[in-house]
Image: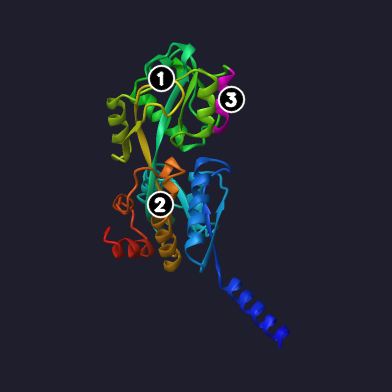
């Protein structure tokens, strides 16, 4: 009888495990800010319910995430609000894409934070403003990245021609070592507040963070349909940074497609917001977020699973 009962328990356990559906979160490169955020979201969701097993997946980045969601390679993914909005509304390159019509299947889940544009230079360069990068070697990220394209728009808005400085083209993960070694005097990169690599650089090499002039942000927002948000890097975020830095931020979103399972999206959304305070205690990417901000719509339809949760808590 004892062996029979053990067999029954094991069978029930196996049945329960088999019933648990797998769900994937498309992030970015391993160890990147988006990957860390996705991993925390997966942990929160897995600890809050038992019907779905969430796992974070490495991807080629935010642009790749659009196709990965639409081809069912991942169930949900991270992106910038600007990219999601532009793709859904088929603006620019997204209107010319072979997948242009497919982009209408994209669905917004929620906004989870904002990440700042960081313009930083070696203090020994003598540079004190964006205009003063002229004549120097300054990194603007790899050409295939969203950040590179955005930096080109920023430079155009600031009236800084590409031929007025030596533009570097390395990824965010590499730029800190390149600046420390004197290859570049600085760079313009999007990364989360207090990023470890940025902290380490400022601890070993005197670094100055630069403001982005308001008129430059305003001109950029003409291109980005007002989707860039004001952002302030608090004083003391990095070693030697004694004053707050005024820049702009990119709202970060979770998205999916119209065919995503409603219950899965509901459970994922519920888990994130019910565990937000704990995640905020260890991750600045989620700072200052509230359900009301997370539920705000920006020109992309919300998935019914997320809408169900936000209506339940009175955020919609």
Where residue 47 sits in the image (x, y, percent)? 50, 60
Q: Identify which residue is drawn at 40% across, 52% down.
A: 276
Identified at 59% across, 43% down, the residue is 30
* Residue 212: mark: none
Q: Which residue is mark 1?
A: 161
What is the number of the mark on residue 177? 3
Give whichever of discs 2 and 3 has the lower sequence position: 3
Q: Nearer the viewer, mark 2 or mark 1?
A: 2
Q: Secondary structure at mark 1?
A: loop
In the rendered image, residue 201, in percent from the top left (x then y), is placed at 53, 25
Which mark sits nearer the N-terminus, 1 or 3?
Answer: 1
Classed neighbour count for the residue bearing mark 2: other residues with Cα under 10 Å, few (<14), some (14–19), many (≥20):
many
Name the spot of residue 122 as percent of width and height, x first: 49, 17
- Circle 3 packing at 10 Å, graded few (<14), some (14-19), many (20+), is some
Seen from the viewer's position, the closer of residues 245 and 84 is 245
Nearest to the eye among marks 2 and 3: give it. Answer: 2
Check the image and report above or below for 186 versus 274: above
Q: Quadrant of the C terminus?
A: bottom left
Relative height, residue 111 to residue 207 (above, below): below
Local secondary structure at mark 3 = helix
Classify residue 194 as left or right of residue 108. Answer: right
Query: What residue would you read off at disc 2?
Result: 276
Residue 178 falls within the magenta-colored stretch: yes
Q: CA distance from mark 2 to mark 3?
A: 33 Å
> For the magenta stretch, what is the residue range?
173-181
Residue drawn at (71%, 88%) of the image: 1
Residue 128: image x %, image y %? 39, 15
């Amino acid at each position: 009888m004892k062996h029979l009962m053990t067999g029954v328990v094991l069978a029930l356990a196996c049945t329960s495990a088999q019933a648990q559906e797998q769900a994937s979160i498309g992030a970015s490169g391993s160890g990147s800010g988006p990957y860390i955020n996705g991993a925390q979201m997966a942990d929160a969701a897995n600890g809050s319910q038992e019907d779905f097993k969430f796992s974070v997946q490495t991807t080629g980045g935010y642009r790749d995430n659009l196709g990965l969601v639409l081809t069912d390679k991942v169930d949900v993914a991270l992106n910038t609000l600007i990219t999601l909005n532009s793709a859904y509304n088929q603006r620019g390159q997204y209107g010319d894409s072979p997948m242009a019509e497919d982009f209408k299947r994209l669905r917004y889940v929620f906004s989870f934070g904002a990440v700042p544009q960081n313009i930083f230079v070696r203090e020994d360069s003598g540079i004190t403003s964006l205009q003063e990068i002229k004549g120097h070697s300054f990194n603007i990220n790899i050409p295939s990245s969203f950040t590179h394209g955005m930096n080109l728009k920023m430079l155009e808005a600031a009236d800084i021609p590409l031929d007025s400085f030596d533009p570097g083209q390395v990824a965010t993960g590499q730029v800190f070592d390149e600046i420390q070694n004197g290859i570049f005097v600085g760079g313009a990169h999007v990364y989360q507040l207090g990023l470890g690599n940025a902290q380490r650089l400022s601890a070993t090499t005197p670094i100055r963070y630069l403001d982005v002039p308001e008129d430059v942000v305003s001109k950029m927002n003409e291109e980005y349909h007002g989707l860039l948000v004001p952002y302030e890097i608090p004083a003391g975020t990095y070693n030697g940074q004694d004053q707050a830095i005024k820049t702009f931020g990119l709202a970060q979103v979770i998205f999916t497609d119209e065919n995503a399972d409603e219950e899965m999206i509901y459970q994922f959304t519920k888990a994130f917001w019910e565990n937000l305070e704990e995640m905020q205690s260890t991750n600045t990417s989620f700072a200052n977020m509230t359900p009301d901000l997370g539920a705000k719509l920006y020109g992309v339809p919300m998935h019914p699973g997320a809408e169900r949760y936000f209506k339940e808590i009175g955020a919609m």
